């Protein structure tokens, strides 16, 4: 979508923790100049004079429901600021829901990658138990499922499935074409697609808003390591490619979910690195600059755990130094998708004893706070 020579207006919110007040602003985005200006809606006074956007923020980041870290303020983009912006952007973006069923769960990386290659953005993702979802009448009705789990397992013992929400232009046509290209043996049992944007909204509500699903997780919290796909990698649409790099014959992605972190959360998670990492503040800024994809990674049951899962998976990720990763371990995740020491594609647990605690921070603590 072209945004050339446009002034785009958004309503954004920022929670000021000191006085415990939710503040609302009118944010004016000027493209292609990549400049921004803000007005306090409570006083109608200019809050931020027109200035250049920080390098980590792009015009494409300004999407309803997204969050941007602008000059140390974690801003939630809640609605369009005027009808002109709504008309230009709302009609240009379509929402699509994809349910990857247990029979196709192992293909999650390839499926998401194929969608991202069509210039569609992942705006939410979450793994779930098929057995549990079949017990929710509303979910089975909206998805058109039947209660017989065996129809969807097709002999596969695993119970994991994943809900993914994509947004972009001509989203439905693009994913429908992809479904036909992949030639599923049983399309309705392997992958489910929303019928239209309204149906996608219903599915999104069930998996990402409803109380019954909010605190549901597939994480096991034992013999595991944590992997986070960082915001810059999400923005570059490399989620699927990174997932596909994880050797499926050795590791299981036992839980996956998208999170938006406030700066305080990111700093708390990275607390162990404070005073040790020279780029600590930049690391924290990166982690809260956009959506993060959290993964619980476990060894496959058939793999003899002769080596701790944390140490083993670090070899898949590659060294923290991206240049070293590219030169010595070019097939590692950081070797392929890292940009710099801060934007090095993913975080993974460093210490063997921290695997469970890091997974728990996302799939227990943060979920519990929702």
Image (cartoon, rainbow, N blue to C red):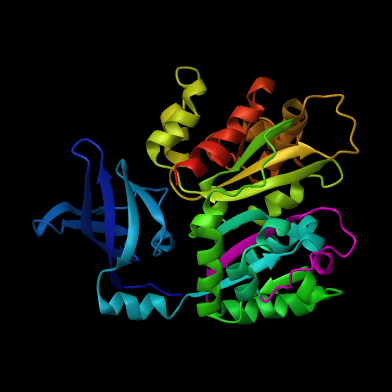
The answer, for residue 345, to whether it is visible in the render is no
In the rendering, at what x and y percent does residue 80 appear?
30, 70
Find residue 332 and report its image quarter.
top right
Magenta region: which residues? 144-169
Q: Which residue ends up furthest to the top in the rendered image?
A: 275
In the rendered image, the vertical position of residue 299 relative to residue 90, given as above or below = above
Which of 174 and 147 lies nearest the eye of the viewer? 147
Which of 154 and 246 lies nearest the eye of the viewer? 154
The answer, for residue 281, to whether it is visible in the render is yes
Find residue 264 and report its image quarter.
top left
In the rendering, at what x and y percent does residue 308 appear?
78, 25
Which of 135 and 53 lies nearest the eye of the viewer? 135
Residue found 73% across the figure and 73% down from its top = 146
Residue found 79% across the figure and 55% down from its top = 106
Residue found 40% across the figure and 76% down from its top = 90
In the rendering, at what x and y percent does residue 2 appear?
42, 75
In the rendered image, the vertical position of residue 84 relative to residue 358, given as above or below = below
In the rendered image, the vertical position of residue 171 relative to residue 272, given as above or below = below
Q: Tell whether position 160 is magenta.
A: yes
In the rendering, at what x and y percent does residue 78 appear?
33, 62
Which of 147 and 155 lies nearest the eye of the viewer? 147
């Amino acid at each position: 979508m072209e945004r050339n020579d446009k002034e785009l207006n958004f309503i954004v919110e920022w929670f000021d923790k000191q006085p415990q007040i939710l503040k609302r602003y009118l944010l004016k985005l000027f493209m292609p100049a990549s400049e921004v200006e803000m007005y306090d809606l409570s006083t109608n006074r200019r809050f931020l004079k027109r200035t250049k956007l920080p390098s980590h923020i792009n015009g494409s980041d300004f999407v309803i429901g997204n969050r941007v870290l602008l000059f140390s303020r974690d801003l939630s983009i809640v609605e369009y600021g005027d009808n002109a912006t709504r008309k230009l952007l709302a009609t240009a973006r379509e929402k699509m829901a994809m349910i990857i069923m247990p029979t196709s769960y192992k293909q999650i990386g390839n499926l998401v990658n194929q969608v991202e290659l069509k210039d569609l953005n992942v705006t939410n993702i979450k793994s779930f138990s098929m057995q549990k979802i079949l017990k929710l009448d509303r979910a089975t009705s909206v998805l058109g499922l039947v209660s017989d789990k065996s129809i969807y397992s097709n002999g596969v013992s695993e119970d994991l499935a994943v809900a993914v929400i994509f947004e972009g232009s001509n989203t439905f046509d693009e994913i429908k074409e992809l479904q036909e290209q992949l030639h599923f043996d049983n399309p309705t049992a392997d992958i489910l697609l929303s019928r239209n944007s309204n149906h996608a909204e219903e599915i999104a509500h069930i998996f990402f808003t409803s109380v019954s699903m909010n605190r549901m997780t597939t994480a096991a919290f034992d013999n595991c390591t944590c992997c986070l796909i960082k915001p810059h990698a999400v923005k570059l649409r490399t989620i699927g490619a990174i997932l596909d790099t994880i050797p499926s014959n050795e590791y299981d992605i036992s839980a996956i979910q998208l999170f938006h972190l406030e700066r305080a959360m990111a700093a708390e998670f990275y607390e162990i690195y404070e005073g040790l990492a020279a780029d600590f503040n930049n690391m924290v800024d990166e982690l809260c600059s956009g959506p993060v994809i959290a993964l619980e990674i476990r060894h496959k049951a058939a793999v003899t755990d002769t080596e701790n899962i944390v140490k083993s998976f670090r070899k898949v990720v590659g060294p923290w130094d991206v240049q070293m990763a590219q030169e010595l371990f070019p097939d590692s995740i950081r070797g392929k998708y890292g940009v710099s020491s801060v934007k090095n594609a993913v975080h993974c647990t460093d210490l063997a004893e921290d695997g469970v605690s890091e997974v728990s921070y996302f799939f227990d603590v943060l979920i519990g706070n929702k």
